[in-house]
Amino acid sequence: MATTNGKDYIDFDMEFTAHPTTGDLVQVKKNNVINRQIQNIVKTAWYERLMQPNISGGVDGLLFENFGPLTDSRLAKAIKNSISKFVPIAQVKKVKVIRKEDQNAYQIYIEYLPDNSTTTVTTEAYLERA
């Protein structure tokens, strides 16, 4: 994995808020950019992105499986594979899946190492059956 130590990642704010003094779009920087990329990939279903049908988090079909350790491990594996494939700037260290059976949902904790840092970062995703 190629490293870009010291490189800052910059993206625009998805709410399109204007900067109070300049009027430009507010920027999101560093780990927040990577967190957003991970969230977007994990929550993307097959054929959801126009002209890019192969991009998916691979979890949409697993959300309707029975709750159990097998589904937990399949979810963790699908998330790890999709992040390594579509978010190359993050190296996944651990994916922890917590079942929320009463809410028909999963709480996912993803621990990763950004390629521009030496410290691990944790982000979370909430996946529910809709």
Image (cartoon, grey):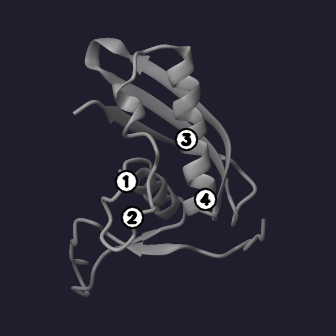
Residue type pointed to by label 4: Lys
Q: Circle 1 is placed at which residue position?
A: 46
Above or below, 113 relative to 102:
below
Which of the two labelled residues, at mark 2 and mark 3, occupies the earlier sequence position?
A: 2
For label 2, the SS is loop
Q: Residue at x 21, y 33 (%)?
A: 130
Percent across and percent down for residue 89 are 63, 64
Q: Answer whether labels 2 and 1 touch (C-beta < 8 Å).
A: yes
The span from disc 4 to disc 3 (Cα, nearest Å) is 11 Å
Which of the two labelled residues, at mark 2 and mark 1, occupies the earlier sequence position?
A: 1
Q: Circle 2 is placed at which residue position?
A: 53
Q: Circle 4 is placed at which residue position?
A: 85
Residue type pointed to by label 1: Trp
Q: Answer whether labels 1 and 4 touch (C-beta < 8 Å).
A: no
Above or below, 130 relative to 121:
above
The mark closer to the camera, 4 or 2, is 2
Q: Answer whether labels 4 and 2 touch (C-beta < 8 Å).
A: no
The mark closer to the camera, 2 or 3, is 2
Front-lying residue, 126 or 31: 126
Whether residue 106 appears in this view of the structure is yes
Which of the two labelled residues, at mark 1 and mark 4, occupies the earlier sequence position?
A: 1
Residue type pointed to by label 2: Pro
The disc placed on residue 78 is 3
Q: How many discs mark residues in the rendered view?
A: 4
Which of the two labelled residues, at mark 1 and mark 3, occupies the earlier sequence position?
A: 1
Front-lying residue, 128 or 26: 128
The span from disc 4 to disc 2 (Cα, nearest Å) is 14 Å
The disc placed on residue 36 is none
Tell me if mark 2 has few (under 14), some (14-19) or many (20+) residues whose alpha carbon lies within 10 angstroms of its own: few
Tell me if mark 3 has few (under 14), some (14-19) or many (20+) residues whose alpha carbon lies within 10 angstroms of its own: some
Q: Residue at x 24, y 83 (%)?
A: 21
